[in-house]
Image (cartoon, rainbow, N blue to C red):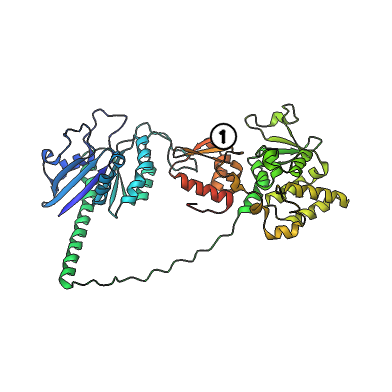
Amino acid sequence: MSIHIVALGNEGDAFHQDNRPSGLIRTYLGRSPLVSGDESSLLLNATSAVARPVFTEYQASAFGNVKLVVHDCPVWDIFDSDWYTSRNLIGGADIIVIKYNVNDKFSFHEVKDDYIPVIKRALNSVPVIIAAVGTRQNEELPCTCPLCTSDRGSCVSTTEGIQLAKELGATYLELHSLDDFYIGKYFGGVLEYFMIQALNQKTSEKMKKRKMSNSFHGIRPPQLEQPEKMPVLKAEASHYNADLNNLLFCCQCVDVVFYNPDLKEAAEAHKIVLCAVSHVFMLLFNVKSPADIQDSSIIRTTQDLFAINRDPAFPGASQESPGNPPLRVIVKDALFCSCLSDILRFIYSGAFQWEELEEDIRKKFKDSGDVSNVIEKVKCILKTPGKFNCLRNCKTYQARKPLWFYNTSLKFFLNKPMLADVVFEIQGTTVPAHRAVLVARCEVMAAMFNGNYMEAKSVLIPVYGVSKETFLSFLEYLYTDSCCPGV
């Protein structure tokens, strides 16, 4: 009977290569009292014609008469250069040991992102040991950013090692040095425990096969157990419209300010929300050009209602942020501007509470002509290019489907650079996004962008510990209140 151990990774320090001790596996085989065999018989091909072998094979005897075969693979390139060999090694292993040096954080993240997913797919319910070797040097304070759980120092933190162990269902060990205590009692004790378990399992399987072959020669149908009753999951009500509606009142991430004809501030808003509802605002904020819309009524409405002021001498300009000040928009129509707060509340609520908007406008004006004038301008703002009279009967129309899901939606801006004011860097690629949506829909993002974190003032934000596909699914949920993985 034999036990096969596959050891992956390099426990050496990439920054301190001189005078380093022998490797973890070789040290264990040389010092363990349960393993017999000298180094000359253990090492088979380390001195072969290849200057840097892909792996080294050790053979010894454990527990007296059990053959112990160890394949030590310090170079992860075996997964790229010889997938067939690496797959067979993992598939035939009884125990897998993954080693890394705590002072080589670059190699750790490279292995974690590129090779650990491959190992997870090839694992076959075998025990895994994560060995973090070395004493941390020049360790910095960990980052408190709520977006990532890893530290920003030059060392691999204990948290990162434990998280990797959780992903693989592994046992995590920290070996500060390769001495008798850490090798013989700490690492050796755990490894030998798994060796005993592997022997017990193989003995049990061998006895079962022998018993089955002696008792009968036919094939019995499988005995299936009754599945456990799954718990009933209660669906939580959507907070999508409420989140965006609250964004109007919290005044976070404001990037556009409306002024009345007298140049007095009227209201604050967010370009991304306005453009998600109206092509008029898309045209005003240069998301689309007149050639893209090709609807004279929308172009005329934009020109008649709004004007952008970029004059640095504009009243109040000195108090604004010098880095990226909000865009100043003059509302030319005084009647429309007097109802702007109600109109914005209508837009941020999803643009389907039409009856409440009509009632609010009627309360402001005694003249029915003024009421009709403002209502018609709102209808023009919500118009879809090329559609005629689509908003003539707004009550019936919006009872069928809210404008959030019919006209334009936030999904149009998902993973697109238009109006984006933050870029996430993940797995070597960039993902543009909009702070206003993130702050409105996610409490963690709101704390990050408005707290005392470096991400609050950064445009490029790195993301660790998650794949690009998973992060895009997360953004899709924030933008659309739905998620379709794999689509």
Residue 105 to residue 474: above or below: above
The local secondary structure at tag 1 comes to loop
Q: Position of residue 66 (x, y in %)?
A: 13, 52
Residue at x 18%, y 71% (from the top left corner): 217
Q: Position of residue 331 (x, y in %)?
A: 77, 39
Q: Position of residue 186 (x, y in %)?
A: 24, 46
Residue at x 76%, y 47% (from the top left corner): 380
Residue 332: name its quadrant: top right
Residue at x 75%, y 56% (from the top left corner): 394
Three-letter amino acid code of the residue under disc 1:
Lys
Total marks shown come to: 1
Q: Taking 93 as reference, is 265 left or right?
A: right
Q: Nearer the viewer, residue 205 or 406?
A: 406
Residue 419 to residue 277: above or below: above
Q: Is residue 452 visible?
A: no
Residue 415 to residue 230: above or below: above
Q: Is residue 6 visible?
A: yes
Instruction: Single out the residue that lies furthest toward the right.
Output: 367
Q: Position of residue 248 (x, y in %)?
A: 67, 46
**In which quadrant is the N terminus drawn?**
bottom left
Residue 415: name its quadrant: top right
Instruction: Single out the residue that lies furthest toward the top.
Output: 313
Residue at x 50%, y 49% (from the top left corner): 473
Q: Taking 14 as reference, is 480 left or right?
A: right
Q: Would you name the residue on which mark 1 appears?
A: 457
Q: Taking 35 as reference, is 397 left or right?
A: right
